[in-house]
Image (tube, helix red, strand yellow):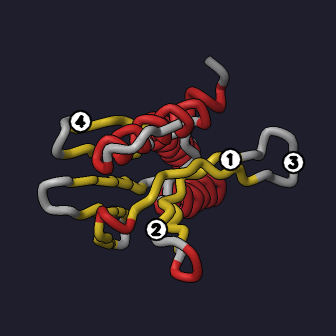
Amino acid sequence: MTPAGFLAGPLRVTQESDAVLEIENRPTRRVAIAAALIVLATAAGLAAIADGASGTGVLVLAMAGLIGWLYLRAAVQVTQLRLDRTAGLARLRVTTFRGQHEETYALAELHKLDSVAQYGTAAGNDETRLVLICGSGPERREILLPMFQPDPEEVVRLTGLVNRWLFRLRGEDPS
């Protein structure tokens, strides 16, 4: 496993049946590592204050708090996609520090889930994203599933899984 793969947000199938398919992205490893680094930096700042270097300690505490808050605000994002044949709906729910946002789409309008590569400016900065393709022709919409740096291999695997589930809904051949 590469460091990028270790830090990637895991994509998991939380529920799979003929009636319901639910996947989610929870960046737990990345958040746990960030929290450990914040605690370590806080301890270093408090140790500096205890040793008499109060200016340095306060600066370390302030930087740990600011950088930690900004990073966690971006990284703590739980994305859930629930496809429900019984209700005929696809629900996309994103939960962050700022609250929860939920969108619902008609499952009949959902054609497929696609993986799209976004190339970064530096080597190793590429990302693969999941996109819901709804509608066709001029009404075609592409809905980006917000995720914090998912593992590209898991994106491809889940794309196939979701598309097979959707094609079974319509009785089509996925090839």
**Mark 1 near mark 2, Cβ–Cβ under 8 Å?**
no
Task: Work out how far the residue at label 4 is from the one at label 3, CA to CA, in angstroms.
Answer: 37 Å
Q: Can residue 116 be seen by looking at this rendering? A: yes
**Nearer the viewer's eye, disc 2 or disc 4?**
2
**Nearer the viewer's eye, disc 3 or disc 2?**
2
Give the crowd class for mark 2: few <14, some 14-19, many >=20 residues within 10 Å: many
Name the outermost residue toward the left: 86
Residue 7 image-quadrant placement: top right
Residue 168 picture location, percent across and down = 31, 41
Query: Which circle's residue, 1 or 3, is located before the other in the chain?
Result: 3
Residue 75 picture location, percent across and down = 50, 53
Which amino acid type is shown beneath numbered disc 2?
Cys
Residue 95 picture location, percent across and down = 33, 62
Q: SS class of the residue under badge 3?
A: loop
Point out which mark residue 16 bears: 4
Which amino acid type is shown beneath numbered disc 4?
Glu
